Image: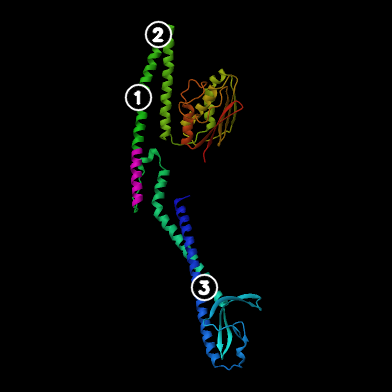
Amino acid sequence: MKLLTKTTVYFLLIMLPVFAAGAFYLYTKFNKEIKHETDEELVNDKLQWMRYLDTASVNNPIFSISTPEFNLQPTEKAAQSKHKLKGINIYQEPENTYAPFRQLSQVITLHNNNYELVLRKSLIEKDDLIKNVVFVMLAAFAGLFLFVLLINWLISKSVWKPFYQSLGKIQRLQLNKMEATVFDHTVTHEFNQLNAALNNMTTRIHNDYTSIKELTEDAAHEMQTPLAIAQSKLELLLQDDTLSEAQLQSILISYDELQRLSKLNHNLLLLAKIENQQYPVTEQPNLCAVIEKYLLLFEELIREKDLIIYKEMTDHAPWPLHPALADIMVSNLLGNAIKYNYPNGRIDIRVNANTFSIANTSQLPEIPADILFQRFKKQNTGYTNSNGLGLAIVKKIADSYRLQLHYSFKNGEHVITVTPGL
């Protein structure tokens, strides 16, 4: 959940009970005031009736009258010094419903006789008034609530805008372009502190990255020269007829290891260049043509093992890769498929604009997923004469160009599938 959304939700959770409590309080207060005003009217009417009845004769028919709003009847009850007020519901025959009334009752003494005086006032109109007031009040509360919510959202969005700008820069950050990334000054102290820390961090990271990059490149280049000299010297020694068979064998082993070291150095330099994004996509090479090229280059190795090659390729399959990296990916995958295959084995190659898969038979077991693409790690001893960088390079190419790399093992076949990412 976004921070702005989270803030808004918390604001809603806090404000809704507050507004509900405020609405309930105002409704209760207003209803109480209506009843109070009605009670005052009833008391005033009682006083008026008392004055009138004091001057009326005993035989006046008013001393025995009953209506929904006025009732005066003789009673044997004792006289009361104070009236009683309460709310009642009276059946209304025309509407066939009960209507709310406010009632005042008191036993009074007139001309030495006791009478029960009952005065009532309808609350129907006042209830309608309350409903209208409540509706207006709720509408006002709703409007105010939405207005406050909108203002809070706009203010929060404006206040948090520098944060999201800095976050966007971090998400788009690239090591080779980090030097040009600057987090701007804002009017908010906390964001200024954050941006200052980010500026310092990116500067340190860029400096470290530049130092490591230069060290890697320099070391790789510097190592190539002594390796080449050592290989040339060993080649000369291999041509010396005065050396014994054991000496020649030792020199040959050293020569092979130097070649392996040279290849390792080259692959490490290649990984560093890929990580540094030194292979921009300037064109989309046809993967089918690259595969055909390497099938031709590996033709002798394929013939030695009598491998069966099955191809299912479209005429043109452009892929978003640097041409050099397309060559490296195909050569590594196809080279492994040939290298770890058995005589009379099979290699299946399928290519189109959306999928590149290569499957090969092998007597070697499934490679554990947790070490498949890791550098210098091959669990099974059957994977000999390998520095473990082939699939690591393919994985690095896939990550750098947002390709999805999937490995599976079924029916004795190792299958690696590459698909463009979303």
Q: Is residue 247 at least partly visible in the picture?
A: yes
Q: Residues within 10 Å of mark 2 (few under 14, many from 20)?
A: few
Q: Residues within 10 Å of mark 1 (few under 14, many from 20)?
A: few
Residue 200 is one of the magenta-drawn residues: yes
* Residue located at (50% from left, 80% from top): 40
Question: Relative to residue 195, is residue 412 depicted above or below?
Answer: above
Q: Nearer the viewer, residue 141 or 384?
A: 141
**Mark positioned earlier in the residue sequence (1 or 3):** 3
State the extent of the magenta-drawn residues as a range.
189-205
**Mark positioned earlier in the residue sequence (2 or 1):** 1
Task: Tell me the chief SS of the magenta region.
Answer: helix
Residue 288 on image: x %, y %: 54, 31
Q: Amino acid at mark 1?
A: Glu
Q: Report which residue position mark 3 lands on.
A: 31
Q: Is residue 278 at least partly visible in the picture?
A: no
Q: Report which residue position mark 2 lands on.
A: 240
